[in-house]
Amino acid sequence: MHSPAINMAEFMHESIEEQEGNVPEEELEFAPVALDDSLPEVEDPLQEINLGTEKDPRPTFISTLLEEPVKDEIIALLHDFKDCFAWHYHEMPGLVRGLVEHKLPIKEGYLPVKQARRRMSMETEFKVKEEVERLVKAGFIRPTIYADWLSNIVPVLKRKTGAVRICVDYRNLNEASPKDEYPMPMANMLVDRATHNQMLLFMDGNAAYNQITVAEEDIHKTAFMCPGHTGAFEYTVMPFGLRNAEPLIKEQ
């Protein structure tokens, strides 16, 4: 004679098998969208607003979900203050040294490093030279000779525009520079402060690094070599890739 507990276990097992066997496959439904593994949409669809002309486009973007008359008011505001934005290097006056400048102290015991020259394809070399010319015209870099510190260029391709931007391999200089341990704001606290607001604005600073000057006594440390016979240059403004540049630019 089986115990009641065993009989109940057998009954439950048989009931489950019957239920599974009696459900036709064509009647099964997909899981609801709420249980889908795909990532949710976190960015509003954007509408492009041209603050320039057809020959010189100056695009900016606003959310298409904005309601009237708020959308028209924002578009009018952007046009009224379009002179406050910059789309080209020569339009940025930069920040005065009395307000902020970037310094590059060297830890005791470190000597200047001249990196070995690296190879570059002819196509990339041509694009790099074009960017170097733009930086020289804007006053962001200047020719230099007899450089103690000398680093290599790292070309970076911009996905949106296809243009080549110049970064510099400052690993040796960064290793010799003391780390600025200024505490950055916590991301979750910044998000919390945005609650209860009706609108959120994202502002992308055009060439934000290049708006801060390098201390005159430290400019020679930013020297980098160009491909071919272009020569060597040094940054008069803060370049991308320095160890303490990111915290400084976030605080502006």
Image (tube, rainbow, N blue to C red):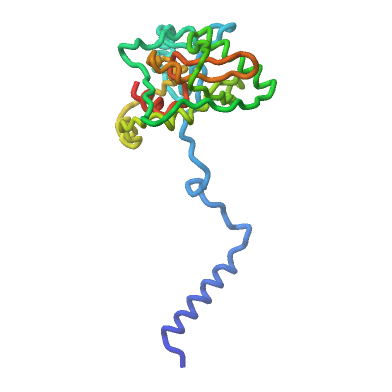
Is residue 184 toward the left or the right of residue 6 in the image?
Answer: left
Q: Quarter-wise, where is residue 70 in the image?
A: top left
Is residue 190 toward the left or the right of residue 159 in the image?
Answer: left
Instruction: Judge whether 2 appears above or below 103 on screen.
Output: below
Q: Nearer the viewer, residue 186 or 29?
A: 186
Residue occupying the point 36% across, 24% down:
105
Instruction: Judge whether 83 appears above or below 43 on screen.
Output: above
Residue occupying the point 61% across, 18% down:
128
Can residue 212 be seen here? The reply is: no
Can residue 219 be seen here? The reply is: yes
Going by the picture, which residue comes out furthest to the bottom?
Answer: 1
Q: Quarter-wise, where is residue 67 in the image?
A: top left
Residue 177 drawn at (x, y percent): 39, 29
Residue 86 drawn at (x, y percent): 46, 11
Residue 231 drawn at (x, y percent): 59, 14
Residue occupying the point 65% across, 26% down:
119
Going by the picture, which residue comes out furthest to the right?
Answer: 122
